[in-house]
Image (spheres, grey):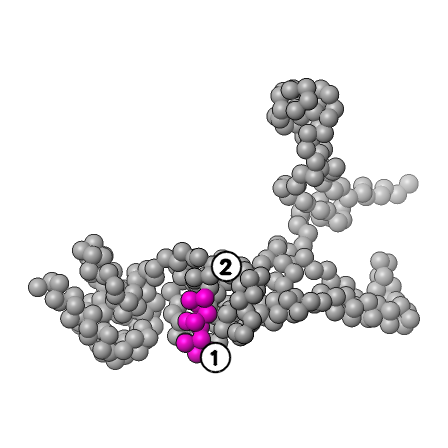
Amino acid sequence: MQNTPPPAKTAQSQPQQITAKCPTCKNSSIAITDIESGEIICSKCGIVISERIEETSREWHIFSPEEINNKTRTGAPNSLARHDRGLYTVIGQSNRDAAGTRIDSVMHSRMQRIRKWDYKTQFVTAQERSLRQAFVELDVLKDKLQLSNAAVEKTAYLYRKAQQKRFIRGRTISGMLSAAAYIACRETGVPRTLKEIASVTNNKVKEISRDYRLLYFKLDLKIPNVDPMKCISKIASKVGLSEITKYHAAKMLNNIIAEEKSAGKDPMGLAATVLYLAGIKNHENVTQGFIAKTAGITEVTLRNVMKDLKKHQS
């Protein structure tokens, strides 16, 4: 008799026992939790204390005997940067049945029709179509600005809030998305300026600024200031300054912040100024025009900040 492999085992949810107080019999010792039915049951009188509880543990699924030691999760994580939060379903393109046999022409035509309607039903309302277009642009913006996943999720959240409150009416999707991305960069500590975002999205700085002010006041946001220390690393990497120059610039900036001389100054202009002064101190060949252009400021701004710092020193 030929030995057959044992069937694949899947993770079964077992009843668990937790501590809870029954409102009927006041029993506070043990309550039984049934994960399959989503209920918490009193072990003494049998009353259902709570129902429809959420399962927060991991769902491991094993699809073959060979994968017993290789557990995998099913599906991708939910994301606000998807028009349906990543809960969509996709009909496969294999055109084969469960046994691996190719389906006939009649069934193939029927499956193509089902796939077509399944795709159409994902974008029924105008809001869903607008979200889909916006988040396609957000994927492109993520690559161009090198945004983190946290910044992308925050951008998607702000855009959804703007759409929910109907702030997008009369405004472009790209402009509102750029403003939300700028706010997300400020909140996550990513040094990105309005000019950088405007250049990669082909929008005007004035338009993004207007949408930014709308989101700031209407949503009552609390946006932190830009950290000039992160601007130092960004500018120094683009200019090609040495590590010793970056160290002296950071030390100089710490002294300026400690003496409260940085109040009211542009963080990017302040970072460019201390880098220029540190470059002169370390005999780095860097000009005011080059470092100002890299930082996105004018030479006049750089010189004004230097004069202000020297005035405080004297």
- Estimate how packed mark 2 is, as few (under 14), some (14 to 19) or many (20 or more) residues with alpha carbons within 10 Å: many
Looking at the image, is 225 positioned above or below residue 202? Answer: above
From what the image shows, is residue 301 above or below residue 38? below
Q: Amino acid at mark 2?
A: Lys
Would you say residue 206 sits in the magenta stretch?
Answer: yes
User: What crowding class fits label 1: few (fewer than 14 Cα within 10 Å), some (14-19), or many (20 or more)?
Assistant: few
Q: Is residue 309 magenta?
A: no
Predominant secondary structure in magenta?
A: helix
Q: Position of residue 23 (x, y in %)?
A: 65, 24
Q: Nearer the viewer, residue 148 or 69?
A: 148
Q: Which residue is mark 1?
A: 202
* Figure check: 33 above or below 118: above
Q: Which residues are magenta?
A: 202-214
Residue at (88%, 43%) from the top-left corner?
A: 2
Tag on residue 154? Answer: 2
Percent coordinates x, y for residue 22 in the rendering: 66, 24
User: Going 16% across and 68% down the picture, which residue do you hit?
Assistant: 308
Residue type at mark 1?
A: Asn
**Sequence-wise first label, 1 or 2:** 2
Name of the residue lying farthest toward the left: 314
Q: Is residue 263 left or right of residue 170?
A: left
Rounded to the nearest angstrom, the CA distance separating label 1 from label 2 is: 22 Å
What residue is drawn where x is 58% and y is 59%? 80
Q: Position of residue 75 (x, y in %)?
A: 67, 54
Residue 201 on image: x %, y %: 48, 76
Residue 44 visible at all: yes
In the depicted view, which residue is nearer to us: 67 or 90?
90
